[in-house]
Image (spheres, rainbow, N blue to C red):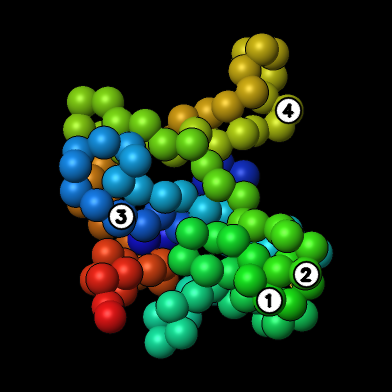
């Protein structure tokens, strides 16, 4: 599932389990840590791919080849929490003047989001042999 953060960043949210906790999910930035290009999910290869310099990331976002793999870089990961049946993505925001002490903004999503365009790995992808 893909979501847009408050600054327009793309966040890939993937569900890996169904225990009912935030640990069932992983939320990754689609911004490559090498030079900032956008990665995309390749379900047929079970990986995220960055077309700028052929960077490859595993489904958990760890760089496995190309410049990110060589440098030991991973896709940035967002903290998640669940409250009252809603999954929250904790997204850092800059220049948030309404509360000078605020370093994060939480974007709530429900568990059956309709804004999903299906570009991230799905649980069924992870269970493939
Ligand atoms: S920007 Fe992604 S590999 Fe270089």
- Front: mark 2 or 4: 2
Query: Which residue is at a point 19% across and 38% down the rendered structure image?
Result: 20
Residue 17 locus on image (x, y percent): 24, 52
Report how far apart the C-alphas of labels 4 and 3 lie in the structure. 31 Å
Indicate whether 34 appears above or below 43: above
Horizontal side, residue 20 vs residue 76: left or right: left
Horizontal side, residue 129 vs residue 58: left or right: left
Q: Is the CB–ligand 1 distance for label 3 below 8 Å?
A: no
For this rendering, which residue is in front, 92 or 73?
73
Residue under label 4, please give it. 95
Residue 124 locus on image (x, y percent): 24, 71
Residue 65: mark: 1
Indicate whether 87 appears above or below 11: above
Residue under label 2, please give it. 70
Residue 15: mark: 3
Q: Earlier in the sequence, mark 4 or mark 3?
A: 3
């Amino acid at each position: 599932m893909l979501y847009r953060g408050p600054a327009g960043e793309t966040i890939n949210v993937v569900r890996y389990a169904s225990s009912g906790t935030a640990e069932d999910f992983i939320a990754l930035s689609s911004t490559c840590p090498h030079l900032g290009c956008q990665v995309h999910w390749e379900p047929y290869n079970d990986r995220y791919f960055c077309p700028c310099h052929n960077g490859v990331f595993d489904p958990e976002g760890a760089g496995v080849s190309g410049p990110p793999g060589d440098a030991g870089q991973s896709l940035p990961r967002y903290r998640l929490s669940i409250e009252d049946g809603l999954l929250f993505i904790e997204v850092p925001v800059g220049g948030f003047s309404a509360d000078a002490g605020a370093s994060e903004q939480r974007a709530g999503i429900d568990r059956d989001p309709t804004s999903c365009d299906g570009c991230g790995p799905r649980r069924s992808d992870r269970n493939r042999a």
